Image (tube, coloured by chain):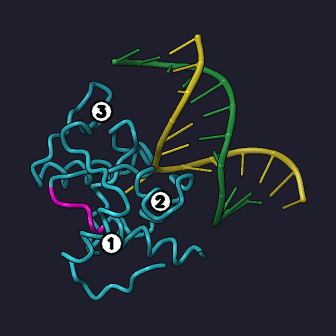
Chain colours: A cyan, B yellow, C green
Amino acid sequence: MDSAEFHAAVYDTVRRIPECRVTTYGHIAKLIGMPNYSRHVGQALKFLSPETNSPVPWHRVINSAGMISSRGPGTNGAQRQREALEAEGIEVTIGRSGDMKVDLGTWGWFPTRNEVASLDEAVEESSGDES
DNA sequence: GGCTTGACGTTAT
DNA sequence: CATAACGCCAAGC
C-alpha cells in the first residue's frame, strides 16, 4: 500500500465516524490494518484540513488522551476543531493552558473492523472498497 | 546513506 | 492523575 492508498483508507474510515462521536488516530490505524501507523494517520489528515470542505470529518479524530493535538501555538487549526466538535454537540473541556479535551468514555467511538464492514452496507456509498 | 521531526500510542514511575 | 521513557514508521533535510 502506497501513501496515496493509505490516505484514501484513512479518509474512507474517518468518513464513517458517526455524528457526535470521536475516535483516535490509533484506532483509525487499527481499522485500516496498520496499528503502528497512528502518526501517519495524522499526517494524512493534515493534508486535507486546510480544505475543510472535504466529506471527511477530520475534527472527530483526536489522540488517545482525548485531547486535540496542538499542531503549533500560532495556528488556529485546533481552535477550529474545537468549534466543529461543539457545533455537533460534543462537549469539549478547556483547561487553563488552553488544552482542549474530549471525554472518550462518553463520546468515544471504537468499533471493530467487522462492525465497520456492517456499517458499510448501511452506507451503501459508491466508494471503492479495499481488500 | 544517516539524523531529526511529527495532528501518536502504550507502559512504567 | 501528571510525567517520563520507549516504540513506532514515513518524510524531509
Residue A118 position (above or below residue A84): below
What amino acid type is highlighted by mark number 2? Val
| Foreground disc of the pair 2, 1 | 2
Residue B3: horizontal and vertical position, in percent?
Answer: 81, 45
Magenta stretch secondary structure, dominant? loop
Query: Label 2, label 1: how many angstroms apart (C-alpha)?
Result: 17 Å
The residue that label 2 is drawn on is A41
Query: Label 3, label 1: how many angstroms apart (C-alpha)?
Result: 24 Å
Q: Residue A98: which disc?
A: 3
Q: Are marks 3 and 2 in contact (CB under 8 Å)?
A: no
Crowding around mark 1 (Cα neighbors within 10 Å: few <14, some 14 to 19, many 20+) is few
Residue A56: horizontal and vertical position, in percent?
Answer: 30, 69
Instruction: Specify whether residue A54 is painted magenta.
Output: no
Residue A72: horizontal and vertical position, in percent?
Answer: 44, 46
- Judge from the rendering whether residue A29 lies leftward or rightward of residue A84; answer left or right: right
- Judge from the rendering whether residue C13 lies leftward or rightward of residue A78; answer left or right: right
User: What range of the chain is rendered magenta?
Assistant: A15-19
Q: Secondary structure at mark 2?
A: helix
Q: Residue at x 26, y 53 (%)?
A: A81
Residue A14: horizontal and vertical position, in percent?
Answer: 33, 64
The residue that label 1 is drawn on is A51
Query: Label 3, label 2: how many angstroms apart (C-alpha)?
Result: 24 Å
